[in-house]
Amino acid sequence: MFQASLRLYRNAYQGLAPSVWLLAGVMLINRCGTMVLPFLTLYLTQHLHYSVADAGIVMAVYGMGAFVGTFLGGRLTDRFGFYYVQLFSLLFSGFFLLMLQLVTGFYALCGSVFIFTLFGDSFRPANQAAIAHYSDADTRTRAFSLNRLAINLGWAVGGGLGGWIAGIDYNLLFWADGLTCLLATVVLWLNLPAPDNASTFSVTKTMRPDADKSGLVSSPYRDTVFIAFMVCAALYLIVFMQLFSVVPLFFKQVLHMTEGKIGALMALNGVIIVVVEMALVYSVEQQKWKKVNLIVGGIVLTSIAYASLTLLEATGLSILTATLFFIVLVTLSEMLVMPFIQSFTVERSTPSTRGQYLALYSMAGALAQTTAPAFGSQMIAHFNFSTHWLAVTGISLLAAGGFWILGQRLPASSANK
């Protein structure tokens, strides 16, 4: 069994292009320094002494900037190419973060945070387009999984170091975040040459503006199937992102868990992804399962996970067992859903519109990131946690049903990609 597991892990990481590994390394460097966002609310309330309401407004502006920034990034990627958009975004983020610590006025902060995320989040679709460019149909989903591995590992490192640094001086967070952005810029610039897009443009110029060779609509904003797909993805992401907003509050206020245990459970999510996801994705791809079916199955697991939170007393399980069950199910769901939504998005696009397709996916994520805490807080304020868990379970099942219906409409070749 050990030899079989070792072979599975080795095969899962084989076949990926060196450029894919380099992009994952750049992402790891960048995310290891991501310290401002996780501690931005504390920075605003504890260091600058703003109210919780004012901090919430700044965070909402952050989300709006991310939403518009991903749209802008998609447009810029299709216009100038993923290479230059990534370089500019990282370079801009690095210098802007170093300057952001000097901004203390409320309205100036709102404007600065919006500008920062507007250009900083243009990195997302450009980076995803780069991964798609340097991978093929057989390795694309695993390439996205490797990138997610780098993100989760970086978040774990950055979050841990950020807590320690914030205890010394909040301003050091901006220095660490900014300098790692600049380091990622240098690594990308020195090791990844600008690709020759001439062949791509020569292909796309011969196509009709509204469709590619397979008949798919070449603009995501005219692709009704893809828009419906993204609506379902946004519903799922709103539910999933409760994990980072309402769930810790539930663990603290209802289950009376310590901050240390809550942090350990949140970290477990990233650890499982780092250890399991690549092998899991490779394994299910070898079995030729349909992407849409995997997505539906993953979302059903999310529904079960959140429904289980309403049944803690009825099950008689210990708090630790019940919360571990929840985290494992949510993480398994994430590993089945996220990489396959990304690879489906790439395969739905044409080379000349890939940035816009990936931007629309990132916009769905940014919208969910903004909506999830607002929805959760309002539900808890007007009802209770149990009602909220039932509501998000229903939303999750709605998303699963939507994906299933879309899967029935897709040609067999598209659904099985």
Image: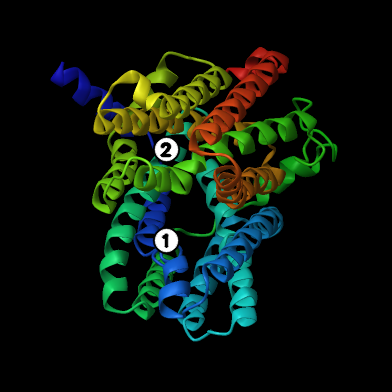
The 10 Å Cα crowd at callout 1, few under 14, some 14 to 19, many 20 or more, is some
Q: Which mark is residue 145?
A: 2
Q: Position of residue 245 (x, y in %)?
A: 47, 49
Camera-nearest residue between 400 and 324: 324
Which residue in the protein does label 1 denote?
38
Quarter of the image where the C terminus is located:
top right
Between the C-alphas of marks 1 and 2, the distance is: 23 Å
The 10 Å Cα crowd at callout 2, few under 14, some 14 to 19, many 20 or more, is many
Whether residue 370 is situated above or below residue 410 in the rendered picture: below
For image coordinates 45% across by 58% down, the residue present is: 192
**Residue 65 placement: quadrant:** bottom right
Q: Is residue 139 left or right of residue 29?
A: right
Query: Which amino acid lies under the numbered mark 2 shown in the image of this protein?
Result: Ser
Q: Is residue 284 left or right of residue 133?
A: left
Whether residue 302 is situated above or below residue 4 in the rendered picture: below
Q: Position of residue 405 (x, y in %)?
A: 69, 17
**Residue 179 placement: quadrant:** bottom left
* Residue 350 is at least partly visible in this image: yes
For image coordinates 62% across by 74% down, the residue present is: 110
Q: Position of residue 95 (x, y in %)?
A: 49, 78
Whether residue 157 is situated above or below residue 134 in the rendered picture: below
Q: Nearer the viewer, mark 1 or mark 2?
A: 1
Query: Which amino acid lies under the numbered mark 1 shown in the image of this protein?
Result: Pro
For image coordinates 42% across by 68% down, the residue present is: 42
Q: Is residue 415 left or right of residue 15?
A: right
Whether residue 315 is situated above or below residue 196 in the rendered picture: above
* Residue 342 is at least partly visible in this image: no
Camera-nearest residue between 365 and 306: 306
Secondary structure type for disc 1: loop
Quarter of the image where the N terminus is located:
top left
